[in-house]
Image: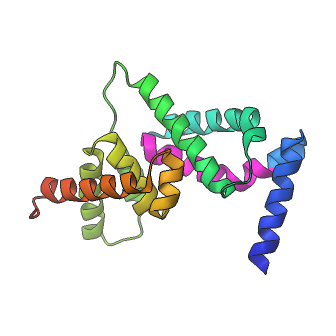
């Protein structure tokens, strides 16, 4: 019952924001900013870039919110907007530069784990960074963000089977990179 009330309240806020209510838009951003920033940071791995991407998402959201049709969960729609914005940002930024290592020092510092586990996490993150972009995207959405294959497919704008295949390939590649069998 509480989930239904929360969903109805969020839908009401979205509808008000779509109609130009600035307070409702501010509430929508406040409710979702951490989610926007987290996915931006996971794609960029650089605090300043994540902040720029998140800011771009907020600006785009103001422009395109009226195109949201309530056909999928708002968070799924917002993730897709964020992922696309992050990809565009990184594509334009990285045309002539090499990509910095994402998800390294900050996650290790934040992780509440024994020192030996922090080293293991660091190694995993370094291996994930070696994956092709489309496989890395699937790993981020499915393994780190907890989306199922159908939701990840919706966010990435591809078929569910494509997500499954990319995840399979990513896992196979990670096993090879880490010296595992396969």
Q: Is residue 11 left or right of residue 20?
A: left
Per the image, is 36 magenta? yes
Viewer-proximal residue, 93 or 63?
A: 63
Tally of marks: 0
Q: Chief secondary structure of the magenta span?
A: helix
* Location of residue 118 by image quarter: bottom left
Per the image, is 34 magenta? yes
Up-down relation of residue 59 to residue 114 (above or below): above
Viewer-proximal residue, 112 or 52?
A: 52
Up-down relation of residue 59 to residue 139 (above or below): above
Q: Is residue 110 visible?
A: no
Q: Quadrant of the C terminus?
A: bottom left
Tell me where the magenta segment starts and ends, as one range: 27-45
* Location of residue 131 by image quarter: top left
Q: Residue at x 40, y 62 (%)?
A: 143
Q: Residue at x 64, y 55 (%)?
A: 75
Q: Quadrant of the N terminus?
A: bottom right
In this view, the residue farthest toward the top is: 96
The image position of residue 44, as x and y in percent, is: 44, 40
Q: Is residue 107 visible?
A: yes
Q: Is residue 9 left or right of residue 162?
A: right
């Amino acid at each position: 019952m509480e989930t239904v009330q929360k969903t109805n309240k969020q839908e009401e806020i979205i509808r008000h924001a779509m109609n130009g209510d600035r307070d409702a838009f501010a509430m929508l951003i406040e409710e979702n900013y951490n989610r926007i920033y987290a996915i931006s940071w996971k794609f960029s791995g650089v605090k300043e870039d994540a902040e720029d991407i998140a800011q771009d998402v907020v600006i785009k959201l103001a422009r395109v919110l009226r195109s949201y049709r309530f056909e999928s969960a708002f968070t799924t729609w917002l993730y897709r907007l964020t992922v696309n914005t992050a990809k565009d940002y990184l594509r334009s930024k990285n045309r002539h530069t090499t990509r910095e290592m994402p998800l390294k020092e900050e996650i290790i510092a934040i992780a509440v784990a024994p020192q030996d586990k922090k080293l293991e996490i660091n190694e995993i993150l370094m291996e994930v960074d070696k994956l092709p972009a489309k496989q890395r995207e699937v790993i981020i959405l499915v393994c780190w963000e907890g989306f199922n294959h159908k939701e990840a497919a919706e966010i990435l704008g591809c078929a569910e089977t494509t997500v499954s295949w990319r995840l399979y390939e990513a896992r196979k590649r990670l096993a090879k990179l880490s010296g595992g069998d396969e």
